[in-house]
Image (cartoon, grey):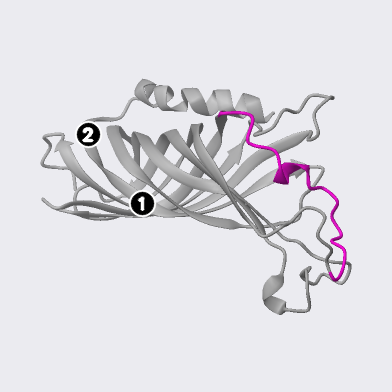
């Protein structure tokens, strides 16, 4: 089902050209940046907290028409994103696991991975185009290209802890990311503030659901599933390169 939705969202931007509405040829470019919270949907499950990281890059937007009150556009981004996962290492009492009685000696494990992410989004907006406020939603496919990874941990193999950890799923702690290409569906909503002759400021919340896995998922592999889930809060600034000549556009 999710793969069918991915195919649908891949072609959604193209469908916007087929609508009959008020023609637009607006093209804007700019930059975006924000904060990303990530985890990985492991199966068997690995207890986790959300791992924080930054994301940012360039944004291109082509507004093609206004259909009734809906402003239709295609948005593409090229971003560098810091993602990964952070493990929640607990004992049977849901307390942190320690090597000693020192509370600063709790076990910790984080995997940080950097990706080049490229979303292609179909966007619908409602409100002002040139001056004022516009609300919008956007959704579409996203691909990710693995760049590098690193690990932050104090876990020492064979070292005794005060209490045992409840989860015995630890294979991922020694496994480098195997799949270098990621893909999935992303979407979100936000608000845009347009200032004449100054550009557009956008605030947005977005969620990404990975359809690919970072590890193999055949019967002979350890994990049946290992896909990313990401929450992004970001701000973008766009400036107009081409604007439709129409005095009625507000």
Q: Which mark is residue 27?
A: 2
* Magenta residue check for 203: no
Q: Position of residue 222 (x, y in %)?
A: 81, 34
The answer to whether one can see residue 69 in this image is no
Count of residue discs: 2
Q: Quadrant of residue 80?
A: top left
Disc assigned to residue 18: none
Q: Secondary structure at mark 2?
A: strand
Q: Left or right: where does residue 103 sit relative to residue 59? A: right
Residue 241: give x, y in percent of width and height: 15, 36
Where's residue 236, x and y in %?
A: 31, 50
Q: Left or right of 143: which side holds 101?
A: right
Residue lying at 78% horizontally and 52% vertically, measured from the top left: 157
Residue at mark 1: 33
Q: CA distance from mark 2 to mark 1?
A: 20 Å
At 79% from the left and 24% from the top, the residue drawn is: 218
In terms of secondary structure, what is the magenta stretch mainly? loop
User: Which of these two is toward me, 12 or 155?
Assistant: 155
Say if mark 2 contacts mark 1, CB within 8 Å: no
């Amino acid at each position: 089902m999710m793969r069918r939705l991915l195919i649908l969202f891949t072609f959604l931007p193209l469908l916007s050209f087929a609508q009959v509405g008020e023609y637009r040829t607006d093209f804007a470019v700019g930059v975006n940046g924000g904060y990303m919270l990530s985890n990985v949907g492991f199966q068997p499950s690995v207890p986790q907290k959300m791992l924080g990281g930054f994301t940012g890059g360039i944004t291109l937007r082509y507004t093609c028409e206004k259909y009734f009150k809906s402003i239709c556009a295609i948005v593409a981004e090229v971003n560098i994103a810091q993602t990964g996962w952070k493990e929640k290492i607990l004992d049977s009492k849901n307390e942190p696991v320690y090597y000693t009685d020192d509370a600063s000696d709790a076990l910790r494990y984080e995997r940080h991975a950097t990706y080049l992410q490229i979303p292609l989004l179909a966007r619908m907006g409602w409100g002002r185009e040139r001056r004022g406020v516009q609300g919008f939603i956007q959704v579409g496919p996203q691909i990710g290209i693995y760049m590098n990874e690193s690990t932050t941990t104090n876990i020492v193999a064979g070292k005794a802890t005060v209490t045992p950890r409840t989860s015995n799923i630890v294979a991922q702690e020694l496994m480098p990311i195997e799949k270098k290409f990621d893909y999935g569906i992303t979407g979100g909503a936000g608000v845009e503030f347009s200032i004449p002759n100054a550009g557009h400021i956008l605030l947005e919340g977005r969620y990404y659901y990975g359809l690919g896995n970072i590890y193999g998922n055949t019967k002979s592999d350890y994990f049946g599933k290992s896909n990313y889930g990401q929450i992004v809060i970001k701000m973008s600034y766009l400036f107009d390169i081409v604007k439709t000549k129409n005095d009625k556009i507000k």
